[in-house]
Amino acid sequence: MSKEQKDALEKRAKENAAAMAKNKALNDAFNAGKEALTAKNYDAAVDAFKKGAELDPNQHVIWANLADTYLAIAATKTGADQQAAIDQGLEAYQKAITLKPDEAPYHNNYALALAKAKKIEEAKTELTKAAQLDPTQAGKYYYNLGAVLVNTGQTAASEDFFKKAIESDPNYADAQFQYATALSAKLTTGADGKVTAPPGMQEALNKYLELQPNGQFAEAAKGMLQMIGATIQTDYSNPNAPKKGPTKKK
């Protein structure tokens, strides 16, 4: 083996060793971040994910987890500190999406963060992308955004997303109930004291009870139907329940 060949071989060996060391450090940082995030040790998680991003800024999964960490921090803060954490989360989500634009959950999570920042139109755009990338999860994506809007006091804006959730999956029981609840803001009371429901509200409540006759919102749904003077059916049955076979005579 010539000197040139030996030098080339040694150089390749050193490069391989450096790559292996970098990969180990990257994996160690990511795993440490995941463990800290699970343990709700958010400061340690941020440090670990940032270290991973410095080792390899092209790892979209690291940016996504860093974003998740910032949003978890935001949930523990108020005022300017909360907004700062949300902004950092949004920035990290943007980097993850730039690296992996076809990952539907990234667009979904980014949309939820945008909603918390009251950037509704931008959230709607991102959620639409998530639904287009993974139509099978569209109902869940729309429902999640509706829930975030309700939890952040933006109930009026939630109506559209709960409606989209049930359009994507008519058998999504909780979405039916939440859509009816959002519509309840449009109830009107006539001079005779009769309460009139907006279009779609009664149908959504009945659909919820059809799907979940004993669900967690069943009593609330019945109460809302009574309030609007609707007749409550008594023969609700879950269409997804297993069918019983014929009874054998003894």
Image: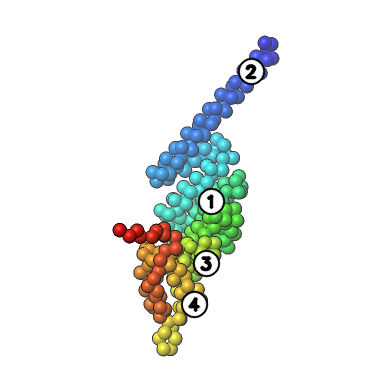
N-term-proximal mark, 4 vs 2: 2
Q: Which residue is drawn at 45% across and 40% down?
A: 33
N-term-proximal mark, 1 vs 2: 2
For mark 1, give the secondary structure.
helix
**Residue at the limit of the structure toward the left, as seen here:** 250
Q: Which residue is drawn at 42% across and 41% down?
A: 36
Q: Mark 4 or mark 2, which is nearer to you?
A: 4
Q: Find residue 213 and report its horizontal and vertical position in percent.
A: 38, 66
For mark 2, give the secondary structure.
helix
Neighbours of disc 4 within 10 Å: few (<14), some (14-19), many (20+):
some
Q: How far is the residue under mark 4 from the one under mark 3?
A: 14 Å
Determine whether, in the image, residue 220 is placed left or right of residue 105.
left
Mark 1 near mark 3, Cβ–Cβ under 8 Å?
Answer: no
Disc on res. 9: 2
Which quadrant, please, contains the N terminus?
top right
Q: Which amino acid does label 4 sit on?
A: Pro
The part of the image, by quadrant, that contains residue 174 is bottom left
For mark 4, give the secondary structure.
loop
* Residue at which label 1 appears: 105
N-term-proximal mark, 1 vs 3: 1
Q: What residue type is labelled 3?
A: Lys
Determine whether, in the image, residue 137 is placed left or right of residue 250.
right
Q: Find residue 161 and report its horizontal and vertical position in percent.
A: 52, 64
Disc on res. 48: none
N-term-proximal mark, 4 vs 1: 1
* Residue at which label 4 appears: 198
